[in-house]
């Protein structure tokens, strides 16, 4: 009886164990072979919008966002039959990635999602995705920011950080108009099955992404290209450390070109230093030199302190005042027109004393110096103009000739355009309009009057006198443009050394001019930093101005106003040292 009970218990235990093993085997087989598509879990994802495009005034694309694919390595997805070295070689060649980097990624079996810092188009993606000899690589859809013209207009456009992952604007238009350009992300909330496929009938929310708005600039791609080419050439010719230029429409303040050298490639912005990202016409404060004399004369004429026929004795090349000697290359008694055409230091210094400190400061601020013009681009500096109450006895005589005051290129050119516009100072602007993805205009750039510092007849007188600068006997005969009259001014200013006065070897060479002089349509400014061995504005910057101005005038189809083929003099008359600078 006892043996029978033991046998019965053994059979029972065996049956239980067999049943358990069968159950485990069945469950294991079901997990591996069964259809579990209805096993679900919550799922959500963000939908990235496409960043808006940046266009020039004629619709040429300067910055665009394109769909692409970013590869990632998944070592566990590498098929056993594939040789990892051969797969790595194929991927390295197709993706232009170092082969050793891919091999290291395949060795890291604890990381199944190793993004590679490259983006590929649809053709490359399809070729790799359908290649049966390639495994261990996956793909993520991206929208990448690209700049098809590379360095062209880079200082104005800027760049986007992490361009393949919906990054933020880092400089220029990309930064200033980031809130318009980036769009509004969308979102999907729903359920996925065990294969991570969305179950469409159980989607809870779908908010589509709204693509970013597009920005249309006032800058002209063709004019910009010519300006950039000229800057590169003059920088190479004179071994300059930097150069910048602007082209502005007189009546409206629209910027047609804004160029800096050195520049950078926004597609590879990380390979350049932050100093290369700067938009030099906006962010460099520099002493304008003799280009400031036009505004000293304009202020004195407007106040009646002098007339166009006023004659002053400038001595014989030097003038002692305020304990310092101011030097000049003009001698004897000269009138206002001659003083401006030949850039007399002493004449302008004496005019500043006739005008008085407070009136001189007020007029300079009226022309936009010492304050930001609020241009629609980031990085604008206000320049430096100390209040008259802080001036000493020497200050007005030096500010009158462009020393002891700092300006930006956009301030200086805009002030000259104000003279050319009948004394109407406009706010410069670089964005014509911002257009939403649905075609609606979100922002419209328009001309804006800032000030009227001088009367129209006074502005006309100054412009007429500035024509003499480019004619025989003036300081910038190299700035003459065949077929067009030019009103302009040279500036050659010494670069200050903090705590040590002014450099004897380093200069800013500038020319700013208006075309055509009778009724100016546009203005051009060119500045070259530390040119060697020549440094005079009439020798270095004036010829660059002439080539740019002639190109722009013909491009805009402005009728010729002067005899074509006029001979241009070979050089600017030499100038003697001023107390702290050159005329």
Image (spheres, rainbow, N blue to C red):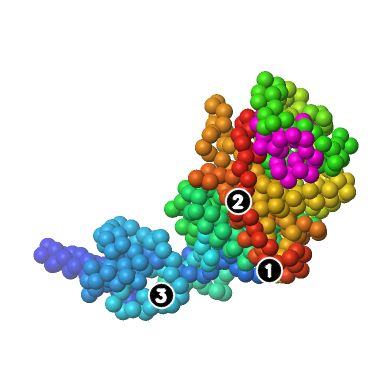
Residue 200 pos. (x, y %): 55, 74
Which quarter of the picture shows residue 430? bottom right
- Judged left or right of residue 125, residue 324 is right
Q: Earlier along the polypeptide chain: callout 2 or callout 3?
A: 3
Say which residue appears at 57% left-offset and 36% top-offset: 495
Q: Measure how far apart labels 1 and 2 are at the Cα level.
A: 27 Å
Residue 359: horizontal and vertical position, in percent? 82, 32
Q: In which quarter of the image is residue 496?
A: top right
Return the x and y of residue 59 as percentages of the image width and height. 66, 70
Viewer-proximal residue, 176 or 225? 225
Q: Is residue 348 magenta?
A: yes
Using the image, determine if residue 48 lies above or below residue 509: below
Pick the front one: 190 or 485: 485
Q: Give the class, few, some or many, for how many residues have Cα within 10 Å of label 1's Cα (few <14, many ≥20).
A: few
Q: What stretch is highlighted in magenta?
A: 326-352
**Of callouts 1 and 2, the N-terminal one:** 1
Q: Where is mark 1, residue-wise?
A: 555
Numbered tag placed on residue 124 in the rendering: 3
Give the label on residue 478, or none: none
Q: Name the residue under label 2.
A: 571
Taking the view exactly as shown, the residue that stands out farthest to the left is: 3
SS assignment at label 3: helix
Please identify the quarter of the rendering in which residue 248 is found: bottom right
Q: Which of 237 and 451 is in front in this view?
A: 237
Residue 390 point in image, percent of width and height: 73, 24
Specify few, some or many for label 3: CA neighbours under 10 Å numbering under 14, 14-19, or 20 or more.
some
Nearer the observer: mark 1 or 2; the answer is 2
């Amino acid at each position: 009886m006892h043996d029978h009970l033991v046998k019965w218990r053994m059979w029972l235990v065996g049956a239980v164990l067999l049943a358990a093993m069968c159950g485990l085997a069945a469950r294991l087989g079901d997990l591996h072979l069964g259809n579990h598509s209805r096993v679900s879990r919550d799922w959500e994802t963000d939908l990235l919008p496409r960043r808006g495009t940046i266009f020039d005034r004629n619709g040429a694309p300067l910055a665009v966002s394109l769909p692409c694919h970013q590869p990632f390595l998944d070592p566990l997805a590498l098929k056993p039959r594939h040789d990892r070295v051969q797969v790595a070689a194929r991927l390295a060649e197709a993706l232009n990635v170092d082969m050793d980097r891919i091999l290291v990624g395949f060795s890291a079996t604890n990381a199944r999602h190793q993004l590679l810092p490259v983006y590929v188009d649809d053709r490359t993606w399809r070729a790799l995705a359908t290649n049966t000899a390639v495994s261990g690589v996956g793909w993520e859809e991206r929208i990448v920011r690209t700049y098809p013209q590379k360095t062209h207009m880079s200082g104005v456009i800027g760049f986007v950080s992490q361009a393949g992952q919906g990054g933020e604007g880092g400089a220029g238009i990309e930064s200033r108009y980031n809130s318009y350009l980036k769009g509004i992300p969308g979102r999907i909330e729903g359920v996925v099955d065990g294969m991570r496929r969305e179950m469409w009938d159980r989607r809870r929310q779908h908010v589509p992404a709204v693509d970013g708005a597009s920005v249309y600039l006032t800058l002209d791609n063709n004019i910009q290209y010519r300006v950039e080419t000229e800057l590169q050439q003059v920088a190479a010719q004179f071994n300059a450390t930097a150069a910048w230029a602007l082209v502005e429409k007189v009546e409206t303040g629209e910027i047609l070109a804004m160029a800096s050298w050195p520049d950078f490639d926004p597609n590879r912005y990380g390979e350049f230093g932050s100093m290369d990202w700067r938009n030099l016409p906006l962010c460099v404060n520099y002493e304008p030199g003799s280009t400031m004399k036009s505004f000293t004369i304009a202020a004195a004429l407007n106040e009646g302190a002098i007339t166009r026929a006023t004659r002053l004795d400038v001595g014989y090349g030097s003038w002692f005042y305020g304990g310092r000697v101011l030097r000049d290359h003009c001698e004897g008694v000269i009138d206002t027109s001659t003083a401006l055409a030949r850039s007399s230091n002493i004449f302008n210094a004496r005019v500043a004393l006739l005008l008085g400190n407070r009136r001189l400061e007020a007029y300079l601020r009226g022309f936009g110096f010492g304050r930001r013009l609020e241009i629609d681009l980031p990085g604008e500096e206000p320049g430096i103009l100390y209040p008259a109450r802080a001036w000493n006895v020497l200050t007005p005589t030096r500010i009158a000739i462009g020393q002891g005051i700092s300006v930006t290129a956009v301030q200086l050119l805009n002030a000259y355009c104000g003279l050319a516009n009948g004394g109407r100072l406009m706010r410069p602007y670089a964005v014509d309009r911002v257009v939403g993805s649905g075609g609606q205009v979100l922002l419209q750039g328009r001309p804006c009057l800032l000030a009227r510092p001088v009367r129209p007849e006074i502005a006309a007188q100054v412009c007429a006198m500035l024509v003499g600068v480019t004619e025989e006997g003036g300081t910038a005969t190299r700035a003459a443009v065949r077929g067009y009259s030019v009103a302009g001014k040279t500036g050659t200013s010494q670069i200050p050394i903090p705590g040590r006065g002014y450099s004897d070897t380093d200069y800013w060479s500038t020319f700013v001019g208006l075309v055509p002089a009778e009724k100016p349509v546009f203005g051009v400014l060119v500045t070259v930093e530390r040119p060697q061995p020549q440094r005079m504005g009439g020798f270095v910057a004036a010829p660059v101005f002439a080539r740019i101005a002639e190109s722009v005038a013909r491009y805009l189809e402005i009728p010729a106003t002067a005899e074509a083929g006029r001979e241009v003099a070979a050089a600017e008359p030499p100038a003697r040292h001023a107390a702290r600078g050159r005329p």
